[in-house]
Image (cartoon, helix red, strand yellow):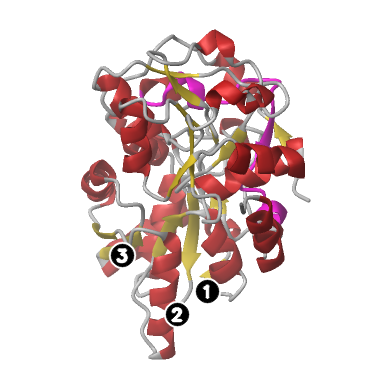
Amino acid sequence: MGRCVVAFAVFALVAFACGPQTSAPVSPAASATAARVTSPEWDALVAAAKQEGKLVLAGPPTPETRANLPKRFKERFGIEMEYIAPGSTSDLLVKMEAERKSGLYTIDAIVGGAQSLYTVAYANKMIDPIKPILINPEATDGSKWVGGKVWYADPEGQYILRLSNYVTNHVVVNTSVVKVADIKSWKDLLDPKYRGKLSFYDPTRAGTGWNTANYLLRRLGDDYIHKLYVDQQPGISADFAQIADWMARAQYPISAGLRESEIEKLRSDGFPVEVLPSMPEAPGLTTAGFGLGVLVNRAPHPNAAKVFLNWMATREGQESWHGTERTVSIRTDVDNTKWAAPYALPKPGVDYFDSYDYEFTVNSRSPAELERLKKLISK
């Protein structure tokens, strides 16, 4: 179930410096000329979008993205962007389904996460194919994409545009309590001396916690999961801020439940927090986070939506997005080291598991699989 993916060799070009990258998001001005590559068909689409004059985009609640993306899009195309941030893609789609029953269609495009886009938006035919409308010459240039072609995440290869790929599932330690050199394997975490010192994001919730538990279950088996999540008496929370606070105070000085944003905030605040190197039995997951783009059907501003998704597939759009989300672009001409932490960059030759694989996402989160996981981690 699911598939393992090997990080593409292009990332061998990335310089892995020590310590976090703290530089501010770069302006896309340097790449603006590249996005000006044109064709008569593209020019006609942009003109039609300008006639509509507006785009309604649903995306993540990152404050920098909410401020930067509408500004960049308007500078580039002269089109206003209304950016809405529902908090989660699942919340958004619940709202959209309710609106559609009343005949309301208010969203043009979404950049969100996998679970709801796969099982609701795609499954319920709420989106139109992107492949036929991806016409900007720069966006469709396969030589500028990792893997040599535009990456679509859906089984038909045309509805869900993947914009990001970065490493997650990091094990983090507070070095005032735990030595980095003492943990070389996931099995080391079962040492009795670490009982009551581990923390995880809630494994029964979609996202970070569920992905981690499912990944370890597939790699290390049922017995390991029970020992880790039950016998080791970890702290479990559905609040990233709480997990970060536990780490800062060394209440739970080992965690596999922190995102890059919390890790880097702790480090910038002076806490002795380190990310462990990949461990051989389960070297890590890759994900797109809020990094899947879709074209909503029956959109109020369809041409503006098409322009936006084309732009997001160009270098300029990718830099505008990833520079504030601090995630990793899958275009080969984007320098991710300007904003992404070194440990988030996929390394060539490492056997990562793609947690955004369609089959894995849809099937591993079935009610039956959830019940199985709950039984394994129940006391």
- Inspect the image, locate mark 2, and give the three-letter code of the amino acid beneath it: Glu
Q: CA distance from mark 2 to mark 1?
A: 9 Å
Tell me if label 2 and label 1 are in contact, CB under 8 Å: yes
- Residue 352 is a magenta residue: yes
* Local crowd size for mark 3, using a 10 Å CA cut-off: few (<14), some (14–19), many (≥20): many
- Residue 81 is a magenta residue: no
Q: Is residue 102 above or below residue 29?
A: below
Residue 309 point in image, percent of width and height: 44, 53
Sequence-wise, the earlier of marks 2 and 3 is 3
Give the number of callouts. 3
Q: What secondary structure is marked by label 1?
A: loop
Kindly identify which residue carries mark 1: 126
* Local crowd size for mark 2, using a 10 Å CA cut-off: few (<14), some (14–19), many (≥20): some
Tell me if label 2 and label 3 are in contact, CB under 8 Å: no
Kindly identify which residue carries mark 3: 56
Q: CA distance from mark 1 to mark 3?
A: 16 Å
* Local crowd size for mark 1, using a 10 Å CA cut-off: few (<14), some (14–19), many (≥20): some
Sequence-wise, the earlier of marks 1 and 3 is 3
Q: Residue at x 28, y 69 (%)?
A: 52
Kindly identify which residue carries mark 2: 97
